[in-house]
């Protein structure tokens, strides 16, 4: 049995039960990868495969016929923490052969919101105990006393300051839990030169032991147009245009 | 000609081109209101009406037949500022008879993001010029020198602090531009008592000269269940359950 994991969509980090931090990802590239996997195996009359499709609520999911559905397990997730838990569980339980990690996972989660006036007063009060260091300020900014309580809807009476803390990185988990998994990573940047994009994509590949990285940049993405560069061992091995073509190239290079 | 404006959906405030602040609104209640308006006029064989449907990108829009489509103008918007401009333009150009303002508009828009370490250093440096006040801190927090440049994708190297500034209120525009418009406002709170909900809904009604306010709270909303209280002149005039029923009650009370 060939086990393939695909992650798709963008996570959502709740702020106060009404507001949330999301991102522009639609999950479209992930779904194209699923379709490309089906096309690949159908062309080879191979039926001994299973896709574990980890997706956020807003990720595009198209109808599949009954036969195809038997090859897919859907794993719904919400915020970055839930992706971490889901990927950890999946990769510990099942020996994943290929992992296409296209999901856009928030680097940050909501920590607190605070009225700008109250925070200013709290910082001003640091002077009362004498001279203070930037470490004192940082401690205060990490967890101000004047922050709104967690179950309060944020009032629009004044400007606010929001603290965001980093989420746990999901990508390193994949190879940690199973060093033999073939890992395809993605790197999206905005408005950088191709050499800078390649440099950052290579860093991502090295840090997470990706076998392939699809590098793309925001300025080159639109609904119908999407330019991607496929990188292996620091070298460009293919360029592709359009999400469907990118997905096809990823799956073919991954499988061979 | 009877002119009806309906606003629906939740606005989206961009953070850095990839991340954004959104809210949980789906625009479903707004669409039910549109359908309830059609039902109301169809039952009375009235064809002399037009609906101006102001909606965000993510708001639910269902197919309408050709005849119905002639009665609707769709006005797409994105962030709070674009809603302000669209509503101002519409209500200046057209004498709106009824305005159902169900859109969830962000109270805040993104101002800046800053690395927590850099901001701490900048605040610490306030001491160099001697004693400082909370006003000095507030000025700094409104616009820190160490903030990331607007076109930079936020790096996940450290925790960050985000400054949010208030957006312009849209609801007061409606009666300012046309005092004769019949205005239906909405107030969503979370986990408050009914008396508190009524109190806040009445404040909203008074501040914006709403003729009707639909008060609801988050804990009483789910996909299939949605409890609403319709308020007129500070009194509960109707309770309704389910978005379809709420929309029907709003339209009937509004038209009579």
Image (cartoon, coloured by chain):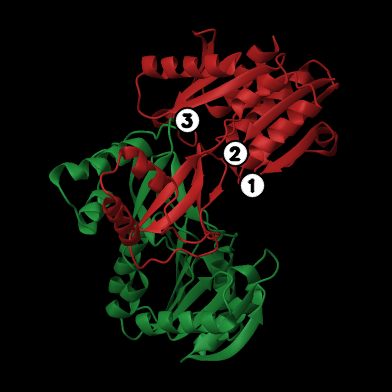
Chain colours: A red, B green
Same-chain check, marks 1 and 3: yes
Quick check: A193 left or right of A236? left
Using the image, name the chain to which the residue with label 3 belongs: A
Q: Which mark is residue B27?
A: none
Residue occupied by mark 2:
A9
Residue occupied by mark 1:
A57
Residue in the picture at 43% in, 63% down: B105
Mark 1 or mark 2: whose residue is earlier in sequence: 2
Residue occupied by mark 3:
A225
SS label for mark 3: loop
Given residues A230 and B76, the one toward you in this image is A230
Mark 1 or mark 3: whose residue is earlier in sequence: 1
For the view shown, which residue lies furthest in the left direction? Answer: B129
- Looking at the rendered image, the quarter that the N terminus of chain B falls into is bottom left
Residue in the picture at 74% in, 27% down: A91
Given residues A21 and A2, the one toward you in this image is A21
Q: Do residues under tags 1 and 3 come within 8 Å of each other at their CB atoms?
A: no
Q: Position of residue A230 (x, y in %)?
A: 53, 15
Q: Is residue B244 above or below residue A191?
A: below
Using the image, name the chain to which the residue with label 1 belongs: A
Mark 2 or mark 3: whose residue is earlier in sequence: 2
Circle 3 residues within 10 Å: few <14, some 14–19, many ≥20: few
Q: Position of residue B224 (x, y in %)?
A: 70, 67
Task: Tell which tag, 2 or 3, sits nearer the viewer.
Answer: 2
Q: Do residues under tags 1 and 2 come within 8 Å of each other at their CB atoms?
A: yes
Quick check: A228 left or right of A103? left
Circle 2 residues within 10 Å: few <14, some 14–19, many ≥20: many
């Amino acid at each position: 049995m060939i086990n393939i994991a695909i992650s798709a969509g963008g996570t959502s980090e709740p702020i106060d039960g009404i507001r949330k931090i999301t991102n522009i990802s639609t999950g479209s590239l992930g779904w194209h990868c699923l379709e490309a996997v089906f096309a690949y195996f159908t062309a080879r009359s191979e039926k001994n495969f299973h896709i574990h499709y980890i997706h956020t609520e807003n990720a595009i999911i198209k109808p599949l016929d009954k036969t195809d559905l038997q090859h897919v397990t859907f794993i719904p997730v919400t915020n970055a923490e839930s992706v971490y838990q889901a990927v950890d569980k999946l990769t510990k339980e099942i020996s994943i052969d290929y992992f296409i990690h296209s999901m856009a996972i928030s680097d940050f989660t909501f920590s607190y919101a605070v009225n700008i006036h109250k925070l200013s007063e709290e910082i001003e009060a640091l002077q009362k105990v004498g001279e203070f260091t930037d470490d004192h300020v940082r401690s205060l900014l990490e967890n101000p006393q004047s922050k709104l309580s967690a179950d309060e809807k944020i009032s629009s009476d004044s400007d606010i300051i929001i603290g965001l803390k980093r989420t746990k990185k999901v990508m390193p988990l994949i190879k940690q839990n199973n060093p033999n998994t073939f890992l395809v990573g993605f790197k999206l940047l905005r408005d950088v030169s191709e050499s800078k994009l390649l440099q950052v994509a290579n860093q991502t590949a090295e840090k997470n032991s990706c076998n392939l990285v699809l590098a793309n940049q925001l300025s080159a993405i639109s609904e119908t147009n999407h330019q991607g560069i496929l990188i292996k061992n620091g070298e460009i091995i293919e360029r592709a245009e359009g999400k469907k073509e990118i997905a096809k190239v990823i799956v073919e290079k991954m499988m061979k």
